[in-house]
Amino acid sequence: MFQPVVPIGGLAGWAFLQDTLARQTEAFDKSPVLTRDTEYFEANISQIRSAEDLVSDRRLLRVALGAFGLQDDLNSRFLIRRILEEGTGEDALATRLTDERYTKLADAFGFDDAVPRTQELGFGAEIVAKYRAREFEIAIGNQDEAMRLALNADRELAEMAVSDDSDETRWFQIMGTPPLRQVFETVLGLPDGFGQLDIDRQLDIFQEKSRTRLGLDSLNDLADDDVRQELIRTYLLRDQIKSVSVVSSMSIALTLLQSSQSQT
């Protein structure tokens, strides 16, 4: 199976990845395991008419969950079935969970509708495209987790920027999507424990700091590739600085410990 290459981290690694992304994703998409799984999904998803049908087929479920970054829930069949069956109504489980990815999963399949989206022409190809993108990001993350989060943010924020949702709704989606939240918390320099604040206070801080530090008057601004790339470069730079600080602190602590031991 083709493994993506990221020879260096940080901004230099991101520049290399952007230059080689088309070639690397093309090679990755031709990997035998990925090809078998995606072809099976596209060939069989139209036969699925209920949440029970989907969770009963592990191969289909793996692609469905992976498309939304929920691959770790593959063995949580009861939870996923309930989320899919209840849909995205006001009292549905998906809308009561803090992780927005469950809402996106339930909305995408529409099993609470009279006719689920699995019956729509092109639905299989839509989910497969999401799955391939996520799998590539995971493969990148096996080498550099910050790079995975950067790729994910670039893709998801580009989609979010052109959605019809209000700015407030989109901010709540960012706050409720762990990978995106991590990127913004790093970019904005928010402290550990920030997530313990009242949710409306968190929203105010995200919006205020994004205006003052990033110049984002609206999340619509992220539809501009240059604006989005500047956010991602800031994330990678801050992540790199934070990593260096952690390593430096550990080195200092180790030196002090060794010094203390040599004096006893």
Image: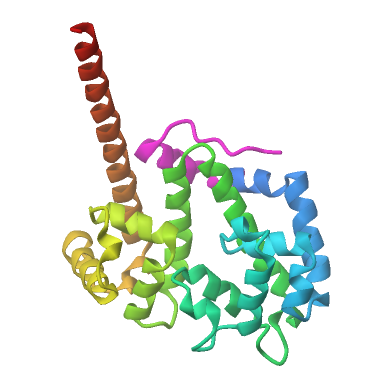
- Specify start and end residues of the magenta stretch as a single range: 1-23
Looking at this view, is 189 or 151 the one in front? 189
Which quadrant of the structure image shows residue 122? bottom right
Classify 167 as above or below 156: below
Classify 92 as above or below 151: below
At a point 68% along the width and 74% down the height, the residue shown is 81
Instruction: State whether residue 226 appears in this view.
Output: no
Instruction: State whether residue 162 appears in this view.
Output: yes
Question: Left of 24 or right of it: where is 121?
Answer: right
Looking at this view, is 224 or 132 the one in front? 132
At a point 28% along the width and 53% down the height, the residue shown is 187
Q: Position of residue 37 (x, y in %)?
A: 77, 55
Outermost residue, bottom direction?
114
**Which secondary structure is most common in the magenta stretch?**
helix
Which quadrant of the structure image shows residue 119? bottom right
At a point 47% along the width and 78% down the height, the residue shown is 96
Pick the quarter of the image with the C terminus: top left
State yes or no: residue 71 in magenta.
no
